[in-house]
Every structure is written in structure tokens, then in C-alpha cells.
Image (cartoon, grey):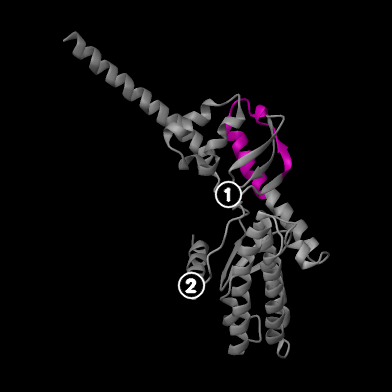
């Protein structure tokens, strides 16, 4: 009987401990919501590594889709991020995990903020460099995600400039075809693996951009307010920030680092998916 009583008492204590642990982990997850992607065991392992921030590295991929590793200076200060492909993006300011006094979630929140601020900063610099550098050089000097975003920003600008002019879209389609051929020539040349990955993804985007312009020219679209243009996914740089628009949806670019990954071929179904998702995001 005594053993049964002790067992029942132990079970009650175990339940109380489990509730307390779940409550503790819930607070941590509410402070840094990306912890919801981790199991309790993984989260406890991260939270236990208060003295050595480098021990968090194996779990980064589950919290940040594009960040595989963080760049540490002197083994303590965080100065940048790396993708799984090996692409490096420096942070706009260093992060000092020791200042968080053992609260891992605090400096990880700083990593998230720095990721977005750094990508916005790099995008702004890349936009300015686009008009100053030859396109072939510019394409291989910036992170892949930034190259794709800035290319789409300038594509939007140039399409809207071409729309009101006579045969503007047909002339611009020829220019896009020429740019595409130049990019293909670059891919055939000697490149780093990172630059080759960037250009491979860019070719997919550029082919779709050329096809869209060609279709609008055939349909006789000649004004930026026509549905044939409004239904396209359009990137704008306004007030030092990137805004994405489609039909009536208007959403700020998220600056979530995605690394230098490939892109699937864009089909009419992809475009319909974009429209559905953009509409859903606007409606929350």
C-alpha cells in the first residue's frame, strides 16, 4: 500500500513538473514565436546552451528557413549569416549574445531583426549600384535573393515606362530577350558556384518576365491601370522599402532570408496561385 501511495504521489508531482515545464516553454515561444517550429526536447537543448551561443547552430535551420549558420567573431559576437549553399550576408550591426544574460530567445530575436534590416540595407545599396554598374558585373556582386528582387523592381519600372509609348512593349520585349541571351552567355562562362546558382534562378524569372511583356503586347495593353498589367506580381521601391502589388493587394516585402536557392518554372497556374495568396494575405 505504501508503494502505491508513493507512486500516486510521484505521478502527481510529475504532472505538476510537466505543467510547469510546458508553461515555461510556452512563455519562451510567445517571446520568440519561431520556437514553435521546435519540439520540446530541441527547445530545451537550445535554452540550456546559455554560455556557448555556437551550440545553437544545429537548430537554426528549423527557426530560419534560409539561415544555416551564423558568422561568429572571436567565437562570441555574431556579425553575419550564411545560407546552406554557403552564401554570406553581413549584418548591419554586430550582435553580442553575452549581453542577453543567458536568455537565448533575446539574442535570437536580434538575429531576426538584423536579418531583415541587413537585407533591406543590401537591397537599397544594390538598387543604387544597378544604374552605376554594367549588368553583367552587377548580377554576380550581390546575394541571389537581392538580385532577383531588384531585377523585378527595375522590370516593373521599365514596363510602366514602355506601356504608354507606341510599340513600347514590343521594343522592351526585344530588350528583355537580349538581356536573357547575355545572361545565358554568362552562365556558359566561368563562374563561381554561387554566381551560377543566382543566374540560374534569374533566367527562370527573366523568361517569365519576357513572356508577360510579349503577351501584354499581343493583348494591346497600353496603360498601367489595365487589368492585364495589374494582375501581374509587381515590385516597387518606395520610401526606402520594397512593396509588392498585385490587383488590389499591396504588401510590404518581408526580407526573410531565403538563401541562394533555385526557382521552379513559372506557369499560368503559378500566377493564379500568386493572385490567390496575395488576396488571402490582404484579407488576413
Q: Which mark is residue 272?
A: 2
Q: Quadrant of the N terminus?
A: top left
Q: Are marks 2 and 1 in contact (CB under 8 Å)?
A: no
Residue at image coords 51%, 68%: 274
Disc nearer the start of the sequence (2/1):
1
Q: Which mark is residue 66?
A: 1
Q: Position of residue 36 (x, y in %)?
A: 46, 41
Residue at image coords 71%, 70%: 154
Q: Position of residue 182 (x, y in %)?
A: 72, 72
Q: Residues within 10 Å of mark 2 (few under 14, many from 20)?
A: few
Q: Main secondary structure of the magenta part?
A: helix
Q: Residues within 10 Å of mark 1 (few under 14, many from 20)?
A: many
Residue at image coords 78%, 62%: 137
Q: Secondary structure at mark 1?
A: loop
| Residue 175 vertical placement versus 147 (above, below) | below
Span colored in magenta: 91-116
Residue at image coords 63%, 68%: 203
Viewer-side residue, 104 vs 133: 133
Q: Magenta segment: does it hold 105?
A: yes
Q: Is residue 26 left or right of 205 when viewed as pictured?
A: left
Viewer-side residue, 63 vs 194: 194
Q: Position of residue 27 (x, y in %)?
A: 48, 34
In the figure, residue 223 lies in which quadrant? bottom right
Q: Which mark is residue 276?
A: none
Q: Is residue 131 left or right of 22 when viewed as pictured?
A: right
| Residue 37 vertical placement versus 163 (above, below) | above
Q: Marks 2 and 1, how far apart in space?
A: 26 Å
Q: Position of residue 218 (x, y in %)?
A: 60, 89
Mark 2 or 1, which is nearer the eye? 1
Q: Secondary structure at mark 2?
A: helix
Amino acid at each position: 500500500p505504501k508503494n502505491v501511495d508513493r507512486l500516486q504521489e510521484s505521478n502527481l508531482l510529475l504532472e505538476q513538473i510537466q505543467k510547469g515545464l510546458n508553461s515555461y516553454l510556452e512563455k519562451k515561444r510567445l517571446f520568440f514565436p519561431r520556437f514553435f517550429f521546435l519540439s520540446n526536447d530541441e527547445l530545451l537543448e537550445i535554452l540550456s546552451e546559455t554560455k556557448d551561443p555556437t551550440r545553437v547552430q544545429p537548430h537554426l535551420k528549423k527557426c530560419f528557413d534560409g539561415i544555416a549558420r551564423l558568422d561568429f567573431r572571436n567565437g562570441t559576437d555574431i556579425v553575419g549569416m550564411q545560407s546552406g549553399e554557403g552564401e554570406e550576408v553581413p549584418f548591419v550591426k554586430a550582435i553580442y549574445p553575452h549581453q542577453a544574460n543567458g536568455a537565448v530567445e533575446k539574442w535570437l530575436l536580434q538575429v531576426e531583426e538584423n536579418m531583415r534590416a541587413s537585407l533591406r540595407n543590401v537591397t537599397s545599396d544594390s538598387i543604387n549600384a544597378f544604374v552605376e554598374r554594367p549588368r553583367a558585373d552587377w548580377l554576380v556582386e550581390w546575394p541571389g535573393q537581392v538580385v532577383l528582387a531588384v531585377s523585378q523592381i527595375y522590370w516593373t519600372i521599365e514596363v510602366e515606362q514602355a506601356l504608354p509609348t507606341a510599340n513600347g512593349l514590343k521594343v522592351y520585349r526585344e530588350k528583355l530577350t537580349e538581356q536573357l541571351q547575355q545572361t545565358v552567355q554568362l552562365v556558359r562562362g566561368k563562374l563561381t558556384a554561387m554566381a551560377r546558382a543566382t543566374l540560374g534562378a534569374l533566367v527562370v524569372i527573366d523568361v517569365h518576365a519576357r513572356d508577360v511583356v510579349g503577351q501584354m503586347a499581343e493583348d494591346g495593353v497600353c496603360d498601367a491601370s489595365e487589368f492585364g498589367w495589374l494582375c501581374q506580381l509587381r515590385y516597387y521601391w518606395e520610401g526606402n522599402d520594397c512593396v509588392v502589388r498585385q490587383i488590389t493587394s499591396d504588401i510590404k516585402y518581408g526580407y526573410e532570408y531565403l538563401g541562394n536557392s533555385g526557382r521552379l518554372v513559372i506557369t499560368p497556374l503559378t500566377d493564379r496561385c500568386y493572385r490567390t495568396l496575395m488576396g488571402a494575405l490582404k484579407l488576413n
